[in-house]
Amino acid sequence: MEERLRESNKSRSKLATAKYLIKPTLQVFSIGTAIMLLLIFVALSEGLGYQISATLSSTHLIVKGHPCEGVICVGYYNISFAGIFYPISYATQSGQKSETFNLVYQPPLNNPHIPTVAEVREKLGASIAVAEIWKNVPYLFVIGCIFGFLAMKIVWMANTKMKKKCSEEELMLKGKDGWTK
């Protein structure tokens, strides 16, 4: 009978330990995911996450009235990613790219026009950065989790310090004999 009681107490303590570990781990992962999404947003913005330059060599109008109506832009681009957001890209030798491109630009139906270099550069940079960010998502998640863990640690330390300060004030109010003054 005593053995069963000991085993049941051991299993309860294991469950309590598991609950104690699961909640902070989920909190760290959720904070890490939020930070990762913020880092992805910053990495996909031109100027902070990447620099791109593009030159158009020619534009060809696709036949009007065709379902794929638009403009084919041909040119050359040079893109450089920020190493802090794209380290895996640099490790795989794709942190900087220089290639020719063929881009189909479909302007809005109510405003058909030949695109400017800035419009082509914006569309091209966004599509290349989105394709490249997927390699770096695990790195950004780990960085987010590290920041999440540090944030949880700071909150825990502040909470512990506040509890200690409150208990010291309570002792001072009660006095040595345990009664309030």
Image (cartoon, helix red, strand yellow):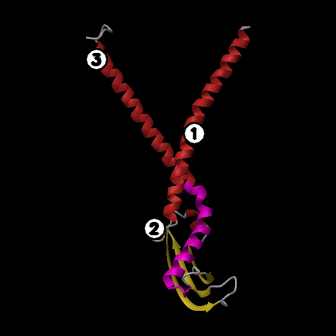
Q: Earlier in the sequence, mark 1 or mark 2?
A: 1
Q: Residue at x 62, y 68 (%)?
A: 131
Q: Residue flagged by tag 1: what amino acid is it?
A: Thr
The span from disc 3 to disc 2 (Cα, nearest Å) is 54 Å
The span from disc 1 to disc 2 (Cα, nearest Å) is 31 Å
Quadrant position of the C terminus in the picture = top left
Name above or below for residue 36 compared with residue 65: above
Whether residue 84 is visible here, answered yes or no, is no
The span from disc 1 to disc 3 (Cα, nearest Å) is 37 Å
Q: Residue at x 48, y 62 (%)?
A: 42
Q: Position of residue 71 (x, y in %)?
A: 61, 87
What range is drawn magenta here?
Answer: 112-140
Residue that carries the numbered disc 1 in the rendered image = 25
Q: Position of residue 126 (x, y in %)?
A: 55, 72
Q: Secondary structure at mark 1?
A: helix
Q: Which numbered circle lies on residue 48?
A: 2
Residue that carries the numbered disc 3 in the rendered image = 172
Whether residue 21 is visible here, answered yes or no, is yes
Q: Residue furthest left?
A: 181
Q: Residue at x 31, y 8 (%)?
A: 179
| Residue 26 magenta | no
Q: Secondary structure at mark 2?
A: loop
Tag 2: Cα neighbours inside 10 Å, few (<14), some, or many (≥20)? few
Q: Residue flagged by tag 3: what amino acid is it?
A: Met
* Callouts 1 and 2 close, C-beta under 8 Å: no
Query: What secondary structure is the magenta-colored segment mainly?
Result: helix
Q: Residue flagged by tag 2: what amino acid is it?
A: Leu
Q: Position of residue 154 (x, y in %)?
A: 42, 39
Q: Earlier in the sequence, mark 1 or mark 3?
A: 1
Q: Nearer the viewer, residue 70 or 172?
A: 70
